[in-house]
Amino acid sequence: MQTRRIFRRPKLYGMMLSLLAGLIYLPAARAQTSEEAGRLYVSGQLDQLIAQGEASLRKNDQQPILHMFVGRAYADQNRYPEAIPHLEKSRQVPAGSDGVKVWSLGYLGTSYYFTDQPAKAQAALEECVALNNTQNATKYAQRRLQGYQLLPFYAGWRVVETAHLRLHFQSPEQVPDLARYAAEREQAYQAISQKFPASLSKKIDFYVWNNKADAKPVLQRELGFAVPEAMLVNARQNQTRGHELAHVLVQHSLQPTQRTKLINEGIAVYLDQTGANRLQRARQLAQGRADVWRLWEHPEAADEGQLYAVGGALLEYLAAHATPEQLRALLKDQRAEANRAALEPLVAAFEQELAKPE
Ligand SMILES: [Zn+2]
């Protein structure tokens, strides 16, 4: 399973009003620069804001509001290493009605998270919440503490790191061989990333829960699932080693613009790194017959087990029989109508395979 985008950009109007109120006390020239930066930020002209802001800061570094806007502009462009020095400067101001300190802390938290510095991310976001300075900034930080799983709840979990993963174990004593468990998942990461290379800005945080019942009240949903945007996975202890990692890597390798359940889950089942006979399993669950296009277009009407099994077998089949370009195109735009012309004959051949006796 996998989630959609979890965070929206915060509403800016309230923040802008309080910022502009704060500007009254600034000398005219600086106020103008900061006001212009605010205008550019709100209208989404981030490149221009960065260029003008950096030029102004080279002449005068003592402009916290400008540092904050430039830092946020970098962060909004996912240029987190460049955002951090600016936000570290703007966070130094005392908390006031302009919201500069708390917004700097909020964006600093995000920037530290995506540069693989979770402790600093947590500290910045917690400070933002503790100041309780503006409602929107507090909400921004609370959502990220929850969504990035930077909560005291996980503080006691055992952490094991590999080259690309940071595994968090709820009950390490229940896993017979932690080092081996971690190494197997690292191998899965490497095998999948050979097919779908991606450069991630942080290790994947991989939470290993004892069971669904423990996770549900904390995560508000059923295990297991990946949050590709946050490079984060929540899994049951006995889940396949590759499925959720595949969701994260495919997302960062191809940046799909349109996802559909059959294809999105199918590629994860295909890459789950088990030795399963996927075609056989699909034959069993589909009882020899499956209308692929119907499953594709109406996943909500399908039995979930059947959908996953047929999807996995279909993607395995297409990986073997479609061209690499067709497979990439399919994964980038996963809608049935976008792929029908290219894949109709292959899908028909797959349905025939599926109809053969076991
Ligand atoms: Zn999945």
Image (cartoon, helix red, strand yellow):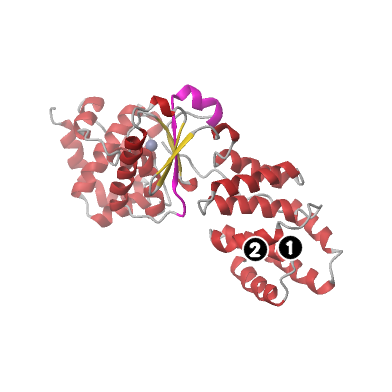
What's the magenta region?
Answer: 201-219
Q: Element type at marker 2?
A: helix
Residue 34 visible in the current orientation: yes
Q: Are marks 2 and 1 in contact (CB under 8 Å)?
A: no
The answer to whether residue 248 is left or right of residue 86 is left
The residue beneath circle 2 is 86
Residue 215 drawn above or below residue 92: above
Mark number, residue 351: none
Q: Position of residue 159 (x, y in %)?
A: 46, 38
Q: Element type at marker 1?
A: helix
Residue 308 drawn above or below residue 325: above
The answer to whether residue 342 is left or right of residue 19 is left
Residue 209 magenta: yes
Q: Residue at x 20, y 40 (%)?
A: 350
**Residue type marked 1:** Ile
Q: Residue at x 57, y 54 (%)?
A: 111
Residue 43 visible in the current orientation: no
Q: Nearer the viewer, mark 2 or mark 1?
A: 2
Residue 280 magenta: no
Between the C-alphas of marks 2 and 1, the distance is: 10 Å
Q: Position of residue 110 (x, y in %)?
A: 58, 51
Q: Position of residue 290 (x, y in %)?
A: 25, 31
Figure quadrant, ligand 1 = top left
The outermost residue toward the top is 213
The residue beneath circle 1 is 65
Q: Nearer the viewer, residue 200 or 119?
A: 119
Q: Residue at x 59, y 49 (%)?
A: 120
**Residue type marked 2:** His
Q: Earlier in the sequence, mark 2 or mark 1?
A: 1
Mark 1, Cα crowd under 10 Å, few <14 / some 14-19 / many 20+, is many
Q: Nearer the viewer, residue 147 or 250?
A: 147
